[in-house]
Image (tube, grey):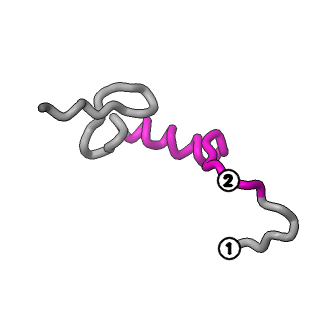
Amino acid sequence: MPKPELRCPVCRKPAVPKHAPFCSEACRNRDLIAWLDERYVVPGRPIGEDDEPG
């Protein structure tokens, strides 16, 4: 059975091995910027005032 084609999670074009899972450096950078702008989040409980960092 053939492997399904990996698609870029940003633009859905076929992924390029050099930039996998993205199709280009531009899409890789767009994804990084989305994380840095907090458009993506990992679910978890909110941090309270009594919680210590780290």
Verify whether residue 9 appears in magenta: no
Please identify, in this view, whether the residue under mark 2 or under mark 1 is nearer the observer.
2
Please tell me which of labels 2 and 1 falls first in the chain.
2
Task: Indicate the amino acid at tag 2.
Answer: Gly
Q: Which residue is mark 2?
A: 44
Residue 29, position as x, y percentages in the image: 48, 42
The residue positioned 64% from the left and 39% from the top of the image is 39
Can you name the residue that lies furthest to the left here?
1
Q: Is residue 52 above or below residue 9?
A: below
Q: Quadrant of the C terminus?
A: bottom right
Whole-number angstrom distance, CA of label 2 to CA of label 1: 15 Å
Instruction: Rate crowding at label 2 as few (under 14), some (14 to 19) or many (20 or more) other CA atoms within 10 Å.
Output: few
Query: Was residue 36 drawn as part of the magenta stretch in this picture?
Result: yes
Which numbered tag is attached to residue 54? 1
Dot 2: element: loop
Q: Quadrant of residue 37?
A: top right
In percent of width and height, residue 26 lies at: 43, 37
Q: Residue at x 77, y 73 (%)?
A: 52
Residue furthest right as drawn: 49
* Residue drawn at 32 percent across, 43 percent down: 20
Give the side of residue 36 with respect to residue 50, left or right: left
Residue span colored magenta: 25-46
